[in-house]
Image (cartoon, rainbow, N blue to C red):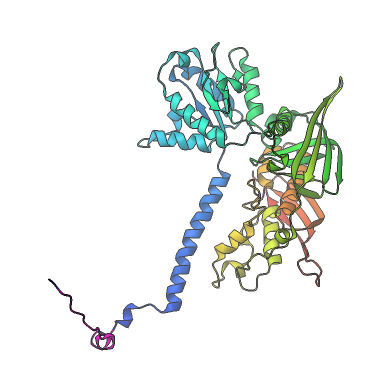
Amino acid sequence: MDTTEEVEFDYEAYTRDNPPDLSKLHPAPEARKRRREAFRARLINHVNMELKHAREMKHVFISYCHENKADVDRLCQALGAHDIHIWIDRDNIGPGTPWKQAIQQAIQHGDFFIVCFSTEVNARSQTCMREELKVAIEELHRRPVDKAWFIPVKLDECEIPDIDIGGGETLQSLQYVDLHENWDAGIQRLLDTISVTSVHDKKHSANAPIGEDNECVLFRSIDGQYYFIPYEKVCWNSTEISLTLCPNASAQVAFLSRLRTRLRDVPDGSSIDQLEAIAFAHQEDAAWVKLRAVEQISTACETVWEIHLKEETVSSAYKNRTEPVILEQLTLDRVAELRAKRLLLDEKLDAASSSLTQTTVFDQMLLEVQIRGELSSQYGNRLQALASPIPELYQHFRKTPERFKKYARLISVLYLKLSGTVEDILHLEVELLNSAALKVNFRGRRSQFDVNKEPVLLEFEGNCPLPQ
């Protein structure tokens, strides 16, 4: 039987005979500095990729049968003429790219899925469309129920397949667009659906009969779309909000209709409080709100919508929570000021202060994360200060400067209030200097974190650069 001999190891004797080579060891501060630099590089790359993704052009995925290439090319041309980016397999899959994976990602990341049906499609027993439909139906289950995403299109006089999409419904349950009966009317219906917010509806922004003096409220839907809707009356009583809205675009009507559908489709025995909150802004105030009632009232002269909302109150434990200070001598109020300048002036961290960007005490990119904020993190449709919303807004309303100024002010109120940047907006004035800049003059009051101290006032003015 083998035995193992126990040997006592003399560590001190070993280190005397084999002293470590100190020249190969790095001083602790130098090692920490290198780790900090490596972490900074990774975080900068992550932030840049996230910003790039956030600003990427949205796209519409089109699924079709290659026998219908001529009609699909015509469809792509019609949508592309309205600056809608199309994702189609023959144009967007590069050589050597795994096509199945590329198609799956394009469907999942697309803002809309258009599937073109025809007699040729129905006659085929096998087609790549079947796989695309399978992925799209799975994605449909993960999408908000109040936003159209899956759009069937009929290219000729055919039947929509009776394919199960779950919940006891089939593809025939979805409203389709018929391009065969009236091509122009069908394209317009697609444009109205895809341009789900007046921010992206160029036809509306240029030709709608709304006057420049009309006041609007602003909704931000759960999928991050904005709706500026004219109102007749707003009654904000404590936490109860009653609205009489006068939508003047089909996209606005579609949004309100989807709100009504959300209430209607609440399962029996469930509470409507389980519906996810949406963001709402009016004049100098904004809140997360939940639906209480949606009613469409039509007369021979007009149609209005009566909306009843309940403001979501945030507990003091959340509202007044202290966030971690991530740089020495940097207060929470200073972070809020940087966030306000990000939202109103599109100011990036590298332009904020040399003392912030050159600091070596903590990584500056952690400050970038803090400026974005864990904004309204109790909601899935959270706000983040990645960039100012004003430049993108200008791209769609540059031809109507008065309307742009009102919308820019309203969307600024939404972000300033719901990001927790300020408690009260005391003054917010915007002035369009020229086609390259919007002058902003702002004063706001922070939340009172210390009962023994007056809340801090944030006050500054500057110019927000606008795209040419």
Residue 184 drawn at (x, y percent): 63, 18
Residue under the point 54% across and 35% down: 110
Q: Residue at x 42, y 15 (%)?
A: 124
- Indicate the position of residue 276 as horizontal and vertical percent values: 68, 43
Could one spot residue 72 in this view of the protein? yes
Front position in the image: 184 or 175: 175
- How many numbered circles are shown? 0
Rendering quarter of residue 112 = top right
Q: Is residue 209 magenta?
A: no
Furthest-front residue in view? 1
Whether residue 401 is visible, yes or no, is: no
Foreground pick, 76 / 159? 159
Image vertical order of residue 265 relative to residue 5, above or below = above
Q: Quadrant of the C terminus?
A: top right
- What are the residue bounds of the magenta stretch? 3-19
Q: Observer-nearest residue: 35 or 352?
A: 35
The N terminus lies in quadrant: bottom left
Q: Residue at x 67, y 27 (%)?
A: 192
Compared with residue 82, is residue 14 higher up or lower down, i.e. above or below? below
**Taking 459 as reference, is 157 left or right?**
left
Give how far across and how far down residue 220 sits, in percent: 70, 42
Q: Which residue is at 65% across, 32% downward?
A: 195
Direction from residue 376 to residue 6 in the image, left or right: left
Q: Is residue 3 above or below residue 290?
A: below
Q: Position of residue 289 (x, y in %)?
A: 75, 44
